[in-house]
Amino acid sequence: MSGTNERLDWVDSAKGISIILVVMMYSVFNVGQDADGIGLFHYVIGFATPFRMPEFFLISGLFLDQVLARNWKAYADRRVVHYLYFYALWAVIHIGLKIGIMSADPLTAANYLLWAIVEPYGVLWFIYLLAAFSLVTKFFYELKAPRWIVLAFAAAFQMSPVTTGSYLVDQFAEYFVYFYAGYMFAPWIFRLVGLAMRHVAVTFAALALYAVVNTALVFSPGYAVLPEHIQMGYAALPGLHLILALAGSLALCVTAALLSRLPFMGWLSWLGERSIVVYLAFVLPMSFARIALGKLGLIDDVTLSSFIVMLAAIGASAALYLLVQWTGRGKFLFERPAWAHLPGTKGSRSYRPAPVPAE
């Protein structure tokens, strides 16, 4: 296996772990709220709280340097329009099904759709912010803004209690530092993972030490594990939260690299490569599974019910993707069609590759 393939394998494995944690969180909190109780997975989510979403954003910034030098149109098509297409499409699907059809309230659905333009809707906020982060990073790149200065401001915003009332602004302030750190420190992150894979015994010891420290700080005085919420202890303190998020993100990358070496873990890399598919689609099957368990009276055991709901959400999303690939229908759900590309960019109908000069 080449170094390039190893790198891609661990990146996909890291995405796989991240999407599992995201689906787990929503499944656990929904089931916990329905049952008014907590289960084992509440504590798993508690442990992962410092790095669960930061890791996703950090990985999303790892390969940004490869496209930042492109002209604005090519870059915007690849890193902004791409995400906005899937956000808009799935916002319509989510709102249409959950409010327009299930609640039979088209006026409220229309209102939600209008608000979704300026405020990220539901779980799709991650996709919306990826477009926003990519756009802002390109502006800083074109302005030749010193990267350390940008990172310092991003870190300051993360450590500040930014509460404007705008979900977009508040989440931008909370998470931009991780996306930018992934872009800025990508070469060092790849070197760290390579070093960790060459010194496995030391890596296991470091991961064990990190796990102990993270657990102690998350479940320190002040923590609370509630059916629909986790309140961290000292880990929530400004500055310390940022450090733990970055440390946890690196630990997850290293763990993913170690797992990618195991032949029976190929499914994790496969899932991570299609993490956006799961992210876009998991909410609907998760809701149906949770409602079905409630109707059947099988939701008393929070741990088991959470696990079933999580498996159903991930499994149904993957099954939908495979069905689309098999039938060739509905590809627009997960693949951007030609009309959704900016004119003249790769993938658009008007794209023409530059001629290669004869040698």
Image: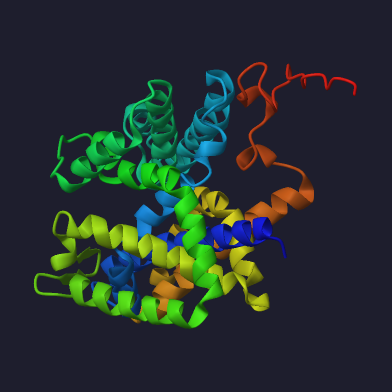
Residue 80 lies, in percent from the top left, at: 49, 30
Q: How is the image coloured?
A: rainbow
How far from the left and from the top, in percent, is residue 57? 41, 48
29 or 72: nearer the viewer: 72
The answer to whether residue 297 is seen in the rendering is no
243 in relation to 90, above or below: below
Q: Quadrant of the C terminus?
A: top right
How many tags in the picture?
0
Residue 248 lies in quadrant = bottom left
**Quarter of the picture holding the N terminus:** bottom right
Kindly indicate the quadrant of the structure image that contains residue 339.
Answer: top right
The residue sitting at the front extreme is 359
Give the left or right position of residue 236, taking residue 188 as reference: left
Q: Is residue 148 above or below residue 218?
A: above
Q: Nearer the viewer, residue 223 or 41?
A: 223
Residue at image location 45% in from the left, 76% down from the top: 203
* Viewer-side residue, 23 vs 106: 23
Residue 122 in view: yes
